[in-house]
Image: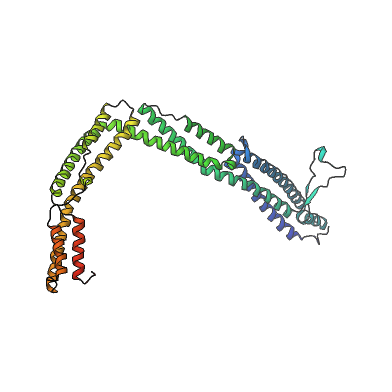
């Protein structure tokens, strides 16, 4: 293979310097690779599944990389040795250096194959230039770092979440022990341990772990919420009971006002039977009495206490709204009376007050509005008909 004329001394020195810089950079990258945290963990880990298969390929790539690297460095050492012999190398030395630096000087010996894979023909060694060797090293290096990147991405995503879930499990266990009531945490604990083992041993096959971890975390979050509520209910029961008694007094007062409103309004406005206010105070009071004597644990009583507090707030709001709505019906009747009077005044201005049809519509609306109890639905329709008549059939 002809390489052309030998390089000049200046060309050799420039090429050797460039290769020395390249060699140092490559050596630094390989040192960084070996010190990479994920690489160090994987090197001693017991792997399984997809990660085990991928790591086997990575190890083969690493083996190729180091063989190439050793051969590459060997050629450079030889070139540096020859160049160091004389300050001004001879033409033979320049030719030899040119061959080393630009020719197929990197020799990879043929691999020794198992006997079942051999041939009686001689195996040929592989010869590469320094540039070809660097390209092959780069391909192997990228294969290794690509695998490390994929594995590290999974660990970076899942291991912190597992750590957080373990911390949550410890918190839930602490709350359970403080409460002193049985809460089964065996399944979440086993699931976290199983998930962590799977993520560590086979991160590339850990896709199902994401969903499993989310389920376990949600269960633990629910347990923590329940236990915190139970502890608060136990520790604050005396105060919250007093607050409930005061709230029940407000419910009784609001329901009494709603009954008074109903009594005052029902003689003025026609109300359906369903509009009769219903009392919740005594039922809620009975719920509080039941809580006082309950033998259940606080995990159960906390939920009942919170539900009772919520129901008491709703009962007070409902009674207040009922009273307001009932009094609002009287206001609605009075508003219709005002509209009817305004329409009559307009009819007088238009000279329509004496019209028999218009007068009949007015009289019907008046009778409905001044009859007790007033049917508001019919009265509103009558006022609307009268108003349309005055406006000539449309508003």
The residue lying toward the viewer, choosing from 109 and 93, is: 109
Quadrant in the picture for the C terminus: bottom left
Is residue 369 toward the left or the right of residue 84 in the image? left
Residue 53 x, y percent position in the rendering: 66, 40
Q: In this view of the protein, which residue sits in the foreground, 369 or 94?
A: 369
Q: Residue at x 72, y 57 (%)?
A: 15
Q: Nearer the viewer, residue 105 or 66?
A: 66
- Quadrant of the frame with the N terminus: bottom right
Q: Is residue 209 above or below residue 333?
A: above
Residue 52, horizontal then vertical, whole percent: 64, 39
Quadrant of the image occupied by residue 205 = top right
* Residue farthest along the front direction in this orientation: 356
310 is higher (above) or lower (below) than 348: above
> With 272 as the anchor, is 301 left or right in this view?
right
Q: Residue at x 47, y 37 (%)?
A: 216
Among the 4 quarters of the image, the one containing residue 132: bottom right
Question: Residue at the spot x=33%, y=32% of the render?
Answer: 230
Q: Position of residue 190 (x, y in %)?
A: 50, 31
In this view, the residue in front, 358 or 324, is: 358
The residue at 31%/31% (across/down) is: 301
Location of residue 384 in the rendering, given as x and y in whole percent from the top left corner: 21, 64
């Amino acid at each position: 293979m002809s390489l052309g004329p030998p390089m000049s001394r200046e060309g050799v020195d420039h090429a050797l310097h460039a290769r020395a810089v390249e060699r140092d950079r490559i050596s630094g990258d390989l040192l960084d690779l070996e010190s990479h945290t994920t690489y160090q963990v994987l090197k001693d880990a017991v792997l399984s599944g997809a990660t085990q298969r991928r790591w086997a390929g990575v190890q083969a790539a690493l083996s190729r990389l180091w063989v190439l690297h050793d051969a590459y460095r060997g050629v450079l050492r030889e070139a540096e040795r020859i160049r160091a012999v004389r300050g001004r190398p001879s033409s033979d030395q320049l030719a030899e250096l040119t061959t080393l630096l630009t020719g197929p000087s990197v020799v990879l010996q043929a691999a020794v194959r198992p006997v079942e894979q051999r041939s009686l023909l001689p195996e040929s060694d592989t010869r590469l230039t320094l540039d070809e060797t660097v390209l092959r090293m780069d391909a192997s290096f990228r294969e290794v770092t690509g695998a490390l990147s994929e594995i590290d991405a999974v660990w970076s995503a899942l291991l912190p979440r597992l750590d957080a879930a373990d911390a949550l499990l410890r918190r839930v266990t602490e709350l359970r022990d403080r409460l002193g009531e049985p809460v089964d945490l065996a399944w979440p604990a086993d699931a976290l341990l199983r998930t962590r083992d799977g993520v560590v041993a086979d991160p590339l096959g850990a896709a199902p772990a994401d969903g499993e971890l989310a389920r376990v975390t949600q269960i633990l979050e629910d347990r923590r919420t329940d236990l915190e509520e139970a502890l608060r209910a136990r520790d604050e029961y005396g105060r919250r009971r007093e607050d409930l008694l005061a709230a029940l007094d407000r419910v009784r007062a609001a329901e009494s006002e709603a009954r008074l409103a109903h009594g005052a309004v029902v003689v003025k406005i026609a109300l359906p039977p369903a509009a009769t206010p219903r009392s919740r105070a005594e039922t809620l009071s009975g719920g509080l009495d039941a809580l006082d004597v309950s033998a259940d644990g606080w995990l159960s009583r906390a939920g009942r206490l919170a539900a009772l507090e919520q129901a008491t707030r709703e009962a007070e709001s409902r009674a207040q709204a009922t009273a307001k709505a009932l009094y609002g019906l009287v206001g609605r009747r009075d508003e219709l009376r005002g509209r009817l009077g305004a329409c009559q005044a307009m009819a007088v201005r238009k000279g329509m007050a004496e019209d028999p049809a218009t007068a009949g519509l007015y009289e019907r609306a008046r009778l409905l509005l001044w009859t007790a109890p007033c049917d508001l639905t019919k009265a509103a329709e009558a006022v609307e008909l009268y108003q349309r008549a005055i406006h000539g059939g449309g508003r």
